[in-house]
Amino acid sequence: MQKVSRLSRFNIASLALGLAFLYLPILILVLYSFNASRLVTVWGGWSLRWYHEFFNDRAMIEAAWMSLRVAVASATIATLLGTLAAVALSRGERFRGRTLFSGMLYAPLVMPEVITGLSLLLLFVALNAERGFWTVTIAHTTLTMCFVAVVVQSRLGSLDRSLEEAAMDLGCDPVGAFIAVTLPLIAPAIVAGWMLAFTLSLDDLVIASFTTGPGSATLPIRIYSEVRLGVKPEINAICTLVIALIAVVIVIASLASKLSSSQGESAAPL
Amino acid sequence: MSSRRIFARPARFAAIAPYVWMVLFFLVPFGFVLKISLSQTAIAQPPYEPVFDLTAGWDALKAAFAALSVDNFKLLGSDDIYVFAYVRSLNVAVTATTLLLLIGYPIAYGMARLPKRWQGIAMVLVIVPFWTSFLIRIYAWINILQHDGLLNQVLLALHLVSQPVVWLSTDTAMYIGIVYSYLPFMILPLYATLAKMEPALEEAASDLGAPPWQVFWLVTFPLSLPGVGAGVLLCFIPIVGEFVIPDLLAGSNSLMIGQTLWLEFFTNKDWPVASAAAIVLLVVLLVPLLLYERLQKRQLEQGR
């Protein structure tokens, strides 16, 4: 009773307005992707015409395929490296170069993308690497492993360490204890980290623009060059498909984090 | 030896692979940016004069050092375009972060005061837009703000304006886009501190006769300052270097530094100047970056 009375009318109004602000633009975008009219703002009845157009747009489909491949590859490598980094930071106690290590992991979270993109491109040029799938994948891995590390580290921090210690007292070696006890407990956070890395990669425009080569544009690069020319209903359809894909990913990730939070407090500190 | 310390040894080995990766793909690239920012522009592929060539021996290295030039930095300092771009970037970032704080705070406050079981749902609702593509969210606003877009149609229908208002290519549109995109980054840290706050403190203040605004200003707000700091840094730093939002929503008559860097790099193909611009941007952001890092480290490593 007392909890409810703490919620003032002002609180409710600001929440409602805030959520409307966050969701209305996306809902409008999705709605207009089913619009039969070519004019984006005139409603001409329901239609799947623009989806049809997208599936016949070869360049777009190729870009989408490229984006999906990069997202899966970079998210997988990033999850592996990010989890290792999280384990080292939360269980490794003190080690040489620890400050530099954590600095390198936290800086990319907020570093402007133009800087990260430019610096990686200059490296690839200096190494004479052919730019395309692998350079974008490496660039995305570098960015997203930091997010994975943060998500997994916050889960590791909330774990009861006496579980690991008990396993070792019962005769497990450290690696065995980690695999038998720690890994299953942090698995939901690892899954959530993979999903986050996947969507971040799928979403990125700036870093991909710097690190990709001619002929291998990602979906955001294609969308961006179309958007610069103005609003097109086909773009609404593509955006809706991406939103649908990400919605599926979110549902899986939230199920995973529900599993994770049922054993303790762990919200991704983003 | 405690089992905790035995556990730590192999855990340290886990650092090797990510450590090498980050040095190679995060730290070393900055060296290249620095190096190229000090070299001369050339019409070639790649478009700069190489500065260091370690294979050529000691003499070549000495010659290379002699060839280093700070011309690109001088250009950045003397050409108004760049100075204006930095000033504008900082201006936009300060204004946008202030707007974000003013809009985000009431929402986070409302979330923290919801009944416990609703708080989780509210948090998911705030995070979900962060997962949907950034570019798509900006595009959604172009749909709404364009000349015959929804906003103008609504305003015309309500007779609030007599002719369509120009929204796109204005600073207003850019601020809407920035606030829209960064709002979750402001709300979440604010909510995290507000939700942990002891309600008894506010109750005590009001029991002792403080009016609601005083309770907020003297008790709630000071206690939420760590969240304010995290939210402000999390928004301010990336906004300074923002490229996509000003490019798609703001006018082209005054550029932010991220746009200038992009232009120098992709359009003018002047890599050395673009690199110098990146170095200056990095220096500008160094203090907020270090502050942010310390905050993040404290949050993650000392438990919350």
Image (tube, rainbow, N blue to C red):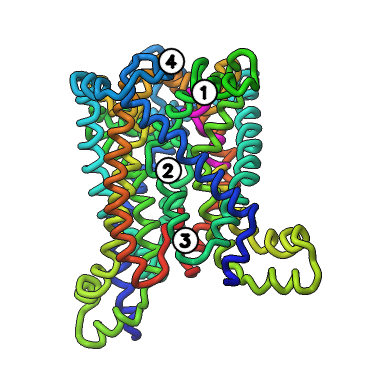
- Going from N to C along the chain, the mark reached first, 3 or 2, is 3
| Residue that numbered label 4 is attached to | B267
What chain is tagged by disc 4? B
Circle number at residue B118: 3
| Residue B10 appears left or right of B29 | left
- Going from N to C along the chain, the mark reached first, 1 or 4, is 1
| Crowdedness near tag 2: few (<14), some (14–19) or many (≥20) residues, C-alpha within 10 Å | many
**Residues at marks 1 and 3, CA–CA distance in whole angstroms:** 33 Å
- Going from N to C along the chain, the mark reached first, 2 or 4, is 2
**Residue type pointed to by label 3:** Trp
**Residues at marks 3 and 2, CA–CA distance in whole angstroms:** 18 Å
Mark nearest the camera among 4 and 3 is 3
| Residue that numbered label 2 is attached to | B129
Circle number at residue B145: 1
Quarter placement of the N terminus of chain B:
bottom left
For the point 39% across and 31% down, the residue is B136
Query: In this rendering, does residue B67 appear at all?
Result: no
**Residue type pointed to by label 2:** Pro
Q: Secondary structure at mark 1?
A: helix
Give A39 or A253, whichever is nearer the viewer. Answer: A39
Give B49 or B122, whichever is nearer the viewer. Answer: B122
> Is A145 drawn above or below residue B70 in the view shown?
below
> Is B170 drawn above or below residue B194 in the view shown?
above
- Going from N to C along the chain, the mark reached first, 1 or 3, is 3
Marks 1, 4 in one chain: yes
Q: Read off the magenta span.
A: B236-248
For the point 55% across and 64% down, the residue is B195
Give A214 or B131, whichever is nearer the viewer. Answer: B131
Give B223 or B103, whichever is nearer the viewer. Answer: B103
Q: Secondary structure at mark 2?
A: helix
For the point 55% across and 19% down, the residue is B169
